[in-house]
């Protein structure tokens, strides 16, 4: 073989190997990005993705990784303000990169992610604007996210479920329009959920039935099970019979398709529903728990754990961590034991969960389990052990970057700190939680308010304590009876310990009147003891003695010396087993180190072999170089020819360089022109704002002149005409004021505009005390070419109502509604419940100035005007916002 051929062969092989290595790296990163999109990622995975950004050569993969990380930060709850800022930065970067790459899917996903971040930041205005710019499924997703945000209250504000319902219904209409069955059913599920949270079971069930029937027609039994579970687990219940009917259907389907995970979680939920329904009779509950335990022992607890997480992800009211009680059969058995008053047996079952999870190696699942274990020790008065395991739960949450059981863990830790005399620390912990301005369930707000009350009570600030306890009672009105009893018990404790026995007596009587089966035994003990103290303080000694006897009987049945010893034995047994397990782990570690040492020895031997191979390769390379040198002289002649060609190429390259320099000059000129263009645009915007300001000032001068002219008039008709003209000028001036004050050049925010016009007119007629206003205006920004005619129509209609609808100081209601009906179609309705038009007046033929203006302005915007007389006068105007508006000649 000729030496030059040998060279070519070596070069070909090396180039192929390099290409294959690049291909394998790119394929690995693509698979990694695809996996990250579909799976929740851990903190370690997120950090690794950040480090690997520089290695990723594919821009679309970078977009996907940015979106994955953005969603990761979105779901973190440990430091929400910082994390949401990080999520927004990543979403913005993903959007900019997608825009440069013309990556449509990336643009849609980045926009939806930005909307979700705005919503979680409690900044709904930009989220609504963003939703209006999106199309099809992306808009539906954001509308549902907006509605979901309104379903839960904050610590200071109640939920806005009517607003949520409107958004879900809008999502349903869009889904039907595009024919997307998946989002039709999801929208309907959210509508049903809103009804259920509003305690409207009939309508909620009816809407969910549509989803269930759709899954039946599709032959999708798994989807039918999911719909039934969402129906039955949305919120807490007092009368759980309807929930049990849905769960029975789901159980039958789960057994038909042979899904043990679904069967277990349905049986678990049925057990908890029977808790509420059977009023303390735990036999049915225990039967369900044992059925689940039998399946769990056969398949392990992992399938049930996965099923509960899938159900928790669909939750829109309760936080995902609140579904942890469904993740293991022993949790249900522990709650059965607590209902029976056997707290040491409860501790035994929770310790069984801890051991099974620790033995499985799934230590990330222990955050909820340690929380439950801490609660069990708290109920037993072992506050040191309670705080130890609650701290372990908190540490695991910190590693994950989010508080899995946020309010429950915080309030229980705060109460433990209070027991340890650390009231200031407890208060700081609560303020940290509520300071994040997150949404909670009503039950969470109740717990937070109670714990705030307990902190201030411990700090001897009784007025503040009473305020928060009363807030907890108020929050409890939105919940089931179980939480109401909890609120009554806490405020009773406060009033008794602060010596306010009459106030305590009110809530204690409510608790004593409640079914005893609805209150767990340990809480019944407290109620009887407090009743004894209140009756003793008020001199009601016979009742006091009766309450004390009940207290003593209950206390003896639950807490006795034998059970206390059993509790200690259980703790010692668990700690002993844990130490044995740690010893085994150490032995395994020693064995692993020995194996690693042997592996290192093998690696050293392999390194020696590799070194020898390298030496042999070097010798081979030298031989190849010698062969190559012999071909050197043959290439000399070819090189001379190549040099001549190179001179010609250099000449052409020089010409190209001159062309490139000229191009660079042109680009510099282009950049200067673009800067000049931006400067002109800024001047144009400033001039438009100044123009709106001056127009507004001129209109105000006209209004002032009219006012001054009116002060010299004696004729009431002329004075009325002057005042009406002044109101019309004010309506137009208000638009220009909005335009320059809000930095908008061509759109007017109708919410504030309509309200300010109506308030101005009512005050100008001095009818604020006799006329009640009801204003419902959607958050719409309307083009100024439509806002001016609409403001004048509103001015004329409201003026007509105020002048004629309520004669002689008659009281009444003025109603204004402005909504978007879809596809940029809007409807304005102005009505009153006054005396109506005179019998001989036909509004469609009336030649008065006000009616003529209303008809003329309606025609100007191509609107459909309808005037009716039912319980007063109603004027309805429907129009479509288009770019071109006809101007009256």
Image (cartoon, rainbow, N blue to C red):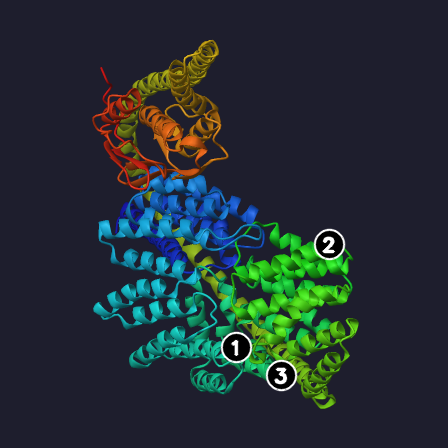
Left/right of residue 700 with respect to residue 143 in the rendered view:
right
Give the x, y percent position of residue 129. Answer: 39, 38
Q: Please identify the quarter of the rendering in which residue 567 is found.
A: bottom right
Mark 1 Cα within 10 Å, few/some/many (few <14, many 20+)? Answer: few
Q: Earlier in the sequence, mark 3 or mark 2?
A: 3
The reply, left or right, for residue 113 in relation to residue 101 is: right
C-alpha span from label 2 to label 1 = 50 Å
Q: Residue at x 48, y 12 (%)?
A: 711
Q: Residue at label 3?
A: 341
Indicate the position of residue 142 as horizontal and vertical percent values: 38, 48
Q: Would residue 615 appear left or right of 474 to someone viewing this image?
A: left
- Residue at which label 2 appears: 463
Q: CA gap, disc 1 to disc 3?
A: 31 Å
- Alpha carbon of mark 3 to alpha carbon of mark 2: how far? 35 Å
Quadrant of res 401: bottom right
- Of the numbered discs 2 and 1, the one sitting upstream in the chain is 1
* Circles 3, 2 touching at the beta carbon (< 8 Å): no
Estimate the x, y position of residue 797 in percent, counting from the top left.
Answer: 34, 29
**SS of the residue under disc 1:** helix
Given contact means CB atoms under 8 Å apart, are the residues at marks 2 and 1 in contact?
no
Q: Is residue 155 left or right of residue 175?
A: right
| In front: label 3 or label 2 | 2
SS state under label 3 = loop
In front of the other: label 1 or label 3? 3
Q: Residue at x 36, y 39 (%)?
A: 833
Query: Would you place residue 122 above or below residue 488 in this image?
Result: above
Q: Residue at x 56, y 77 (%)?
A: 518
Determine the secondary structure under disc 2.
helix
Q: Nearer the viewer, mark 2 or mark 1?
A: 2
Q: Residues within 10 Å of mark 3 (few under 14, many from 20)?
A: many
User: In the image, which disc is placed on residue 360?
Assistant: 1
């Amino acid at each position: 073989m000729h030496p030059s051929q040998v060279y070519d062969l070596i070069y070909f092989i090396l180039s192929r190997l390099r290409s294959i290595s690049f291909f394998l790296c790119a394929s690995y990163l693509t698979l990694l990005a695809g996996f990250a999109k579909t799976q929740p990622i851990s903190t370690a995975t997120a950090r690794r993705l950040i480090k690997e950004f520089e290695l990723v050569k594919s821009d679309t993969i970078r977009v996907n990784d940015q979106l994955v990380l953005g969603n990761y930060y979105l779901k973190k709850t440990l430091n929400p303000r910082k994390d949401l800022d990080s999520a927004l930065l990543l979403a913005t970067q993903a959007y900019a990169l997608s825009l440069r790459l013309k990556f449509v899917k990336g643009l849609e996903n980045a926009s939806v992610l930005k909307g979700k971040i705005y919503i979680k930041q409690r900044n709904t205005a930009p989220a609504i604007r963003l939703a209006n710019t999106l199309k099809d499924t992306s808009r539906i997703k954001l509308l549902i996210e907006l509605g979901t945000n309104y379903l839960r209250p904050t610590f200071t504000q109640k939920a806005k479920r009517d607003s949520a319902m409107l958004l879900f219904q809008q999502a349903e209409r869009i889904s039907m329009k595009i024919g997307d069955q998946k989002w039709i059913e999801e929208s309907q599920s959210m509508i049903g959920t809103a009804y259920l949270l509003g305690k409207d079971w009939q309508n909620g069930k009816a809407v969910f039935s549509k989803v269930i029937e759709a899954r039946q027609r599709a032959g999708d039994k798994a989807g039918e099970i999911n719909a039934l579970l969402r129906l039955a687990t949305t919120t807490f219940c007092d009368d759980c019979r309807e929930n049990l009917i849905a769960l029975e259907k789901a159980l039958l389907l789960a057994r038909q398709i042979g899904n043990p995970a679904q069967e277990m979680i349905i049986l678990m939920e049925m057990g908890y529903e029977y808790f509420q329904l059977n009023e303390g009779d735990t036999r049915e509950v225990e039967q369900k728990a044992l059925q689940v335990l039998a399946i769990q022992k056969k398949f392990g607890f992992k399938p049930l754990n996965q099923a509960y997480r899938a159900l928790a992800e669909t939750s829109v009211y309760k936080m995902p961590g609140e579904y942890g009680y469904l993740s293991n059969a022993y949790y249900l058995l522990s709650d059965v034991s607590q209902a029976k008053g056997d707290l040491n047996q409860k501790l035994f079952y929770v310790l069984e969960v801890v051991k099974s999870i620790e033995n499985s190696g799934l230590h990330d699942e222990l955050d909820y389990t340690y929380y439950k274990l801490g609660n069990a020790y708290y109920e037993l008065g072992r506050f040191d052990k309670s705080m130890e395991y609650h701290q372990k739960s908190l540490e695991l949450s910190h590693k994950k970057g989010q508080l899995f059981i946020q309010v429950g863990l915080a309030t229980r830790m705060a109460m433990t700190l209070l027991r340890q005399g650390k009231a200031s620390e407890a208060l700081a912990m609560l303020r940290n939680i509520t300071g994040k301005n997150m949404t909670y369930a009503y039950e969470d707000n109740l717990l937070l308010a109670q714990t705030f009350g307990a902190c201030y009570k411990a700090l001897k600030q009784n007025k503040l304590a009473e305020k928060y306890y009363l807030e907890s009672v108020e929050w409890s009105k939105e919940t089931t009876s179980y939480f109401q009893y909890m609120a009554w018990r806490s405020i009773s404790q406060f009033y008794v310990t602060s010596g306010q026995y009459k106030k305590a007596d009110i809530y204690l009587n409510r608790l004593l009147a409640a079914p005893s089966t609805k209150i767990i035994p340990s809480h019944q003990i407290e109620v009887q003891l407090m009743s004894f103290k209140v009756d003793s303080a008020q001199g009601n000694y016979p009742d006091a003695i009766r309450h004390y006897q009940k207290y003593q009987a209950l206390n003896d049945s639950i807490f006795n010396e034998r059970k206390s010893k059993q509790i200690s034995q259980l703790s010692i047994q668990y700690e002993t087993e844990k130490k044995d397990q740690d010893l085994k782990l150490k032995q395994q570690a020693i064995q692993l180190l020995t194996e690693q040492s042997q592996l290192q020895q093998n690696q050293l031997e392999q390194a020696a072999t590799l070194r020898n191979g390298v030496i042999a390769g070097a010798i081979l390379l030298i031989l190849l170089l010698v062969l190559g040198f012999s071909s050197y002289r043959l290439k000399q002649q070819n090189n001379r020819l190549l040099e001549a060609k190179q001179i010609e190429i250099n000449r052409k390259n020089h010409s190209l360089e001159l062309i490139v320099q000229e191009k660079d000059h042109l680009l510099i000129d282009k950049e200067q022109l673009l800067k000049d263009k931006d400067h002109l645009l800024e001047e144009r915007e400033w001039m438009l704002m100044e123009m709106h300001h001056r127009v507004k000032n001129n209109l105000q001068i006209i209004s002032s002149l009219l006012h001054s002219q009116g002060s010299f008039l004696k004729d009431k008709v002329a004075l009325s005409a002057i005042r009406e003209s002044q109101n019309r000028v004010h309506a137009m001036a208000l638009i220009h004021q909005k335009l320059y004050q809000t930095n908008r050049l061509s759109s007017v925010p109708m919410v504030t505009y309509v309200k300010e016009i109506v308030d101005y007119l009512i005050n100008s007629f001095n009818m604020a005390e006799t006329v009640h206003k009801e204003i419902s205006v959607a958050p719409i920004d309307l083009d100024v070419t439509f806002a001016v005619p609409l403001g004048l129509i509103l001015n004329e209609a409201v003026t007509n109502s105020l002048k004629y609808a309520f004669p002689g100081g008659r009281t009444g209601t003025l109603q204004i509604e402005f909504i978007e009906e879809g596809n940029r179609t809007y409807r304005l309705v102005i009505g009153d419940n006054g005396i109506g038009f005179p019998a001989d007046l036909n509004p469609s033929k009336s030649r008065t100035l006000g009616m003529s203006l209303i008809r003329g302005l309606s025609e100007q915007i191509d609107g459909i005007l309808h005037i009716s007389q039912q319980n007063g006068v109603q004027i309805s105007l429907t129009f479509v916002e288009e770019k071109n508006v006809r101007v009256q000649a």
